[in-house]
Amino acid sequence: MSTGNMNLTLKVWRQKNNKTKGALVDYKLADISPDMSFLEMFDVLNEQLINKGEEPVVFDHDCREGICGMCSMFINGRPHGPKDLVTTCQLHMRSFKDGDTIVVEPWRAAAFPVVKDLTVDRSAFDRVIAAGGFISVNTGNAQDANNLPIPKMQADAAFEAAACIGCGACVATCKNASAMLFVSAKISQLALLPQGQPERYRRVQSMVAQMDAEGFGNCTNTGACEAECPKGISLENIARMNRDFASAKFVSEETV
Amino acid sequence: MSGFGNAFSSSIGKKFIMGITGLFLILFLIVHCGINALIFISDGGLTFNVGAHFMATNWIIRAGEIVLFIGLLAHIFQALRLTLQNQKARPVKYAVNDGKANSKWYSRSMGLLGTLLLIFLVVHLKDFWVVSRFTGIPTVDANGHEDLYAVMKEKFQDPVRVAVYILAMFSLCYHLLHGFASAFQTLGWNHSKYNGIIKGAGVWYSIIISILFAAMPIAVYFGLIQ
């Protein structure tokens, strides 16, 4: 890694736990390399804090390859920072300028309570999945190529929906803290494929009911979620979910 | 509860009500704007008064008026409920939130635009609807119809009222710019072959309706129509 030459001011949300109030705290960082990822920059900050005997900043991270969905951080008013289609771990300091002030906050939603500092509890997403985001039977091994024909467009759309890593950026950026992009992606990836059909209308009702119970807001179609999603999940999925929900409630004879 | 369960009380169900009532109000605006545009015939309001007379006396229209008010109230109350719920979904606000980076200001301001429209609507209903339905139109035209056109001419002599109407039409335009396409998305009518048409129609609809409505007080005030 090249030697750093960036001097930055960080305003980081520090909050002891869910019971206490938090506040933005200023930190000065010197000699940051533009080649560092945003999380590596936080590692540097934390090492300095530890050396000074202070509490390091707690933040979620895991793969640091942009595929796991663990990292979060609301950076300068945008989830995963200023770049499109990247997660915070894939955001590099070259996207900022020497002398910048960077404000870093946790995802803010009633359904995502702060655990500590920048880490929030996203288990509401797990409970939505557990409510119906699965296929109840084992669908077996991969079939012979043309045993189960699926139109290419359909397969692609299912794959694109399945790209959702469940990071919660959609909820974080939505002015209503709505989870509809996430939930619709998890519904669509199954609704578009033959194995998902038997439970299609039960699934949409159960998952939407759980989403509501978790206290997420209601979608107003601003499109912010789609614009900020690091995986480019499309609003088309929300329309599909709404369509399936209407079919489930008004056409399907199965009630949940 | 019947088999419909929480069809309308769930988050998506509430959106359906917003979308359906929104589309209904969009249809209403076409009728409203179409009949009002009869003033541009510039025949002393004779044709316009025929239209107004029909709207005021035909029983299907009068029954429709009741449905219209129900739809309007449903749209307003549902919006209020959703807004309160949405605020509860984010109790702690962001210190910095760069909304303009990912969405249009009017998409994020539907509540504000709607409130402005509601305030305007109170003024507007008092100006014309109360007069034509309750307090009575004072004069009749050459055909013996109630001269609503004369009421319009008199009201729009006031520059403040004209300004209020024009500003309200800006609110309407932006409210519709988001609302038109949004209603289709909410109802699940998202289709790669039609999305462009819906978006385009929404933009044209919003602009044309708002300009036509705004042109009415302007034309009357400046005496551009007779």
Image (cartoon, grey):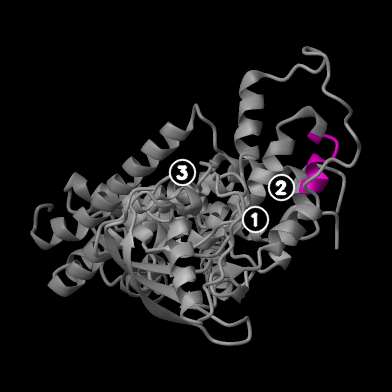
* Pointer 2 local density, CA inside 10 Å: few below 14, some 14–19, many at least 20: many
Q: Image point 41% across, 39% down: which residue?
A: B199
Q: Mark 3 lies on which chain?
A: A
Q: How many marks?
A: 3
**Location of mark 3 (residue):** A85
The reply to whether callout 1 and callout 2 are in contact (CB within 8 Å) is yes
Callout in the foreground (2, 3): 3
Q: In this view of the protein, which residue sits in the foreground, A206 or B216?
A: A206
- Whole-percent x and y of residue B172? 34, 58
Q: What residue type is labelled 3?
A: Leu
Residue at left offset 55%, top offset 49%: A64
Identify residue type, mark 2.
Phe
Residue hosting label 1 = B12
- Which SS class for mark 1? helix
Chain ID for label 1? B
Query: Which residue carries the number 2 mark?
Result: A245
Q: Tell me the CA gap for discs 1 and 2.
A: 8 Å
User: How far apart are the two marked residues, 2 and 3, measured between alpha carbons?
Assistant: 29 Å
Say if A55 sits above or below B169 in the image.
below
